[in-house]
Amino acid sequence: MKAVIVIPARWASSRFPGKPLAMIAGVSLIQRVYERAARAKRASAVYVATDDDRIADHVASFGGRFVRPEGEFQSGTDRIAASLDLLSENYAQVINVQGDEPLIDIDSIDAVIEVLQETGADMATLASRLEHDDERQSRDVVKVVTALSGDALYFSRSPLAGAQRHVGLYGYQASVLKSLAALAPSPLELAESLEQLRALQNGFKIRVAQTTRPHLGVDRPEDVARVEHELAEKQ
């Protein structure tokens, strides 16, 4: 079984247009994400799935691989699903690494792939402990509650009893991803603006693995300085 990492990257972010090409300590955001993802031991290949020539040309300039799926997509997951037929070969598992997470933990990527390959779960994702009450209250922090089996029961932007912080790294069996992309957005997905609820509401199981290393994402221009500070601390 082979796993592929696909990084969705679009130009027209409402909060940060052109975000994939934003420079972080002299290197573009998308290049940092790509090169970090490529270090995962269990992944056989990495691609960027983009809608924009500027992003595609930049990925090619640093030696990365990209695909250009045609169409309008509701989410990064839908963009990745449309990319599967454009990859150089077939893969059993597909990992969605968000294109705005330059500090993503490499071991976490491998952990998600391991769950998919060893358990046969439909999907896999990550969670960590909520550290502060402001995280529990923030709608920018997605929360997840799990069954005793480790499968997700629900995701929400609102506070939930017994919740953990959801870390937005997703893995799919390729067949499951194709099935999900063929489904209409579900009522809960639309209510919470969380695409993973489409899977839960349609009966797919999402196994939640644990991590102690949640990572900083780049949602807005002001996040660049935070990430640069953390990169400097790691050096």
Image (cartoon, helix red, strand yellow):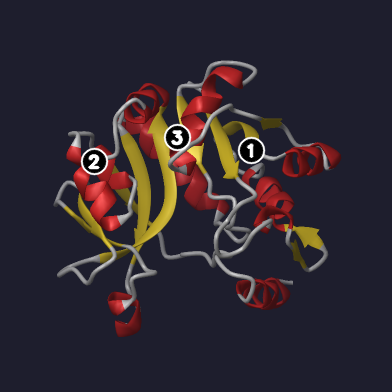
Q: Secondary structure at mark 1?
A: loop
On the image, the x and y values in percent for residue 67 come to 66, 29
Residue placed at 60% from the left, 20% from the top?
86
Q: Earlier in the sequence, mark 1 or mark 3?
A: 1
Mark drawn on residue 186: 2
Which residue is most to the right?
Answer: 61
**Secondary structure type for disc 2:** loop
The residue drawn where x is 35% and y is 77% is: 135
| Dot 1 amino acid type | Asp
Q: Provide residue 170's location: percent of width, then percent of height.
A: 42, 44
- Which image quarter: residue 219? bottom right
Residue type for callout 2: Ser
Tag 3: amino acid: Asp
Residues packed near mark 2 inside 10 Å, few (<14), some (14 to 19) or many (20 plus): some
Question: Which image quarter holds the C terminus?
Answer: bottom right
Residue that mark 3 sits on: 78
Mark 3–mark 2 Cα distance, whole angstroms, equals: 14 Å
Along the viewing direction, whichever of 231 and 219 lies nearer the viewer: 219
